[in-house]
Amino acid sequence: MKNLIKMKWTSYLLLLFVGTANAELERPSNTIIQHQKKIVKPIPKLPTTLVKLKEFVVPGNLAWAAAKDNGFEFYPEGARGRKDGIDVWGASYYNNQQNRLQTVPNTARYSAGINMQLGTLINSEFWDLTEVGVINSYARFHLFAGKRLKSRWSVRNIEVSGSHAVNRRPAANSRSAHYVLDVEIKKGARNTGLVTFKKIVLIGPENQDWREAFKN
């Protein structure tokens, strides 16, 4: 009987030892899990407020003045020296009877920031050329050349009046405002070609002045 009691007591002690040992083994694992939970931080929320864009319709003379003061160029091809659009003379072009491109200097004029003119009465040689089989005469004018708009600004549209052909227009959502057009005079014409820069439509932050577009 004594031996039976002794065996039961020994078994009880053994079970108690094993249980304690298992508890000690599990405790570090729980500590690691708790530690991992402590270092996990929530992902910060991204800001949801975005700068709203607005359309700015600007008259040609005002847009030219602001752009010119910030280094943009306005000129006819063939111009020499300054290209500020105040009173810049350049060349016109035509195809001769052999279909070769010819140049006539001082027959294209960019003036007052908005006026692009081809042919003048003081250039009699030019008029003579139109009477001897010239197929087409034209002058190519550049607006907003040489620089790009400020970040977050783009051009939606540039409007000009008068007979012309667009050679290059700004790409959609581009910071380039470079616009190129051809003013044409047909064969035998006796009048000067005149095109006027009317307005530009800019897209930019609503909380900024439109003049910021050219301050790059």
Image (cartoon, rainbow, N blue to C red):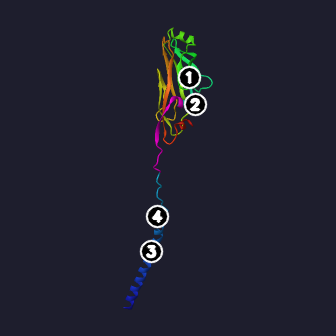
Q: Residue at x 53, y 20 (%)?
A: 117
Residue numbers of the magenta segment? 47-62
CA separation, marks 1 and 3? 92 Å
Q: How far across and how far down the image is residue 96, in percent?
A: 52, 12
Residue 68 tag number: 2
Between 163 and 12, the one nearer to me in the picture? 163
Few, some or many C-alpha atoms within 10 Å of disc 2 (few <14, some 14-19, many ≥20)? Answer: many
Dot placed on the residue nearer the N-terminal end, 4 or 2: 4
- Residue type pointed to by label 3: Ala
Which residue matches tag 3? 23
Q: How far across and how far down the image is residue 195, in percent?
A: 50, 22
Q: How far across and how far down the image is residue 5, in percent?
A: 38, 88
Dot placed on the residue nearer the N-terminal end, 2 or 1: 2
Dot placed on the residue nearer the N-terminal end, 4 or 3: 3
Few, some or many C-alpha atoms within 10 Å of disc 3 (few <14, some 14-19, many ≥20)? Answer: few
CA separation, marks 1 and 4? 72 Å
Which residue matches tag 4? 37
Position of 172 relative to 132 (above/below): below
- Residue type pointed to by label 1: Tyr
Residue 110 tag number: 1
Foreground tag (3 vs 2): 2
Dot placed on the residue nearer the N-terminal end, 3 or 2: 3
- Residue type pointed to by label 2: Lys
Label 1's element? Answer: strand
